[in-house]
Image (spheres, rainbow, N blue to C red):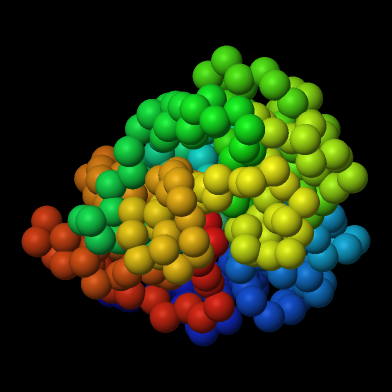
Amino acid sequence: MARLGSWIESHPEGIYVRPADAWIDPSQPKAKALVTHGHSDHARGGHGAVLATAETLAIMEVRCGPQNGQPLAYDEPIRVGDVDVRFVPAGHVLGSAQIVLEHGGERVVVSGDYKRRPDPTCACFVPVPCDIFITEATFGLPVFRHPDTGSEIDRLLHRLHSDPSRCVLVGAYALGKAQRIITELRARGHHEPIYFHGAIERLNQLYESFGVELGELRPATGAPKAEMAGHIVIAPPGALNDRWSRRLPDPVTAMASGWMRIRQRARQRNVELPLIISDHADWDELTTTVRELEPREVWITHGREEALKHWCLTHQIKACELNLVGYEDEDE
Ligand SMILES: [Zn+2]
Ligand SMILES: [Zn+2]
């Protein structure tokens, strides 16, 4: 009998689905790519044809230019070569999908990036039982347990209100995290204008065009310094310690990332207010998901594979690591 999943090949530049002659999230240009979501480590330009959700295609067009794309709705079945394919929500960012592949009586689910907790900007992760679950493990260590998102947002608001002469500058990844922080703030009753760095403007507009309401947003560039006092400003992490931030009124520097669990990381970026808010599954979400899906095998990609592999083996689930290169979630 052939090895389980022998029709799926792992290469440094991505996962190749042989009977579909297609690649998943390839880091090099390929004739046919299935793309899980719009983050740049998964969605690269230059493919001959791209199969993705409409949201992901729209994000790719903003970031990489025009695509020869075929949009797929969640749960819409499609046959690619000799493989039945469908996309189901991954709960990671707008339009993010897990890719469900069926061939020769075997079902393989490629998670892309995912999380299990609710996110007002995207559809919730849908668990699909499978033979092989290919999972990310960005936060695949027991030390990574993300706290409740609402309590982190409350800490942010508390800090903001404690000194109305200052602004709070929140570093947040431009695709997904920034819009999630804004909607979480709105959900906690914060309806003041929120200022933004120019680098997130187009993605804010794209989210709104797909029906995600962000409330009143104002560009920070050009706004008088005094006007921003007592307000929240959102910028990509790279802008936190940049000249750009000098235009802001005595900013309290915050950053929203799963990495903020590690104090050293917060210190390196001069972050005064670390907010542990992640778009990736934490350790409990990873292990809960594997338990729930009951796969026969778990293949682990980008991240700290070793601990999750060990956990799987102690739970009588075969596990291995895939050495894909170029997947990075440093700023997430
Ligand atoms: Zn991602
Ligand atoms: Zn990723």
Q: Position of residue 217 (x, y in %)?
A: 78, 31
Taking depth in this image into account, of 58 and 197 the one nearest to the observer is 197
Image-based side of 231 in relation to 283, left or right: right
Image quarter where the N terminus lies is bottom left
Splitting the image into 4 quarters, where does residue 42 fall?
A: bottom right
Q: Residue at x 84, y 56 (%)?
A: 61
Q: Position of residue 133 (x, y in %)?
A: 37, 57
> Is residue 34 something that shows in the picture?
no
Q: Residue at x 74, y 64 (%)?
A: 243
Q: Residue at x 76, y 59 (%)?
A: 244
Taking depth in this image into account, of 331 and 1 the one nearest to the observer is 331
- Up the image or down, 216 lies above or below 275; here it is above
State the residue lying farthest toward the top: 189
Taking depth in this image into account, of 126 and 21 the one nearest to the observer is 126
Image-based side of 289 in relation to 161, left or right: left
- Up the image or down, 328 lies above or below 188; here it is below
Splitting the image into 4 quarters, where does residue 229 fall?
A: top right
Q: Position of residue 330 (x, y in %)?
A: 50, 66
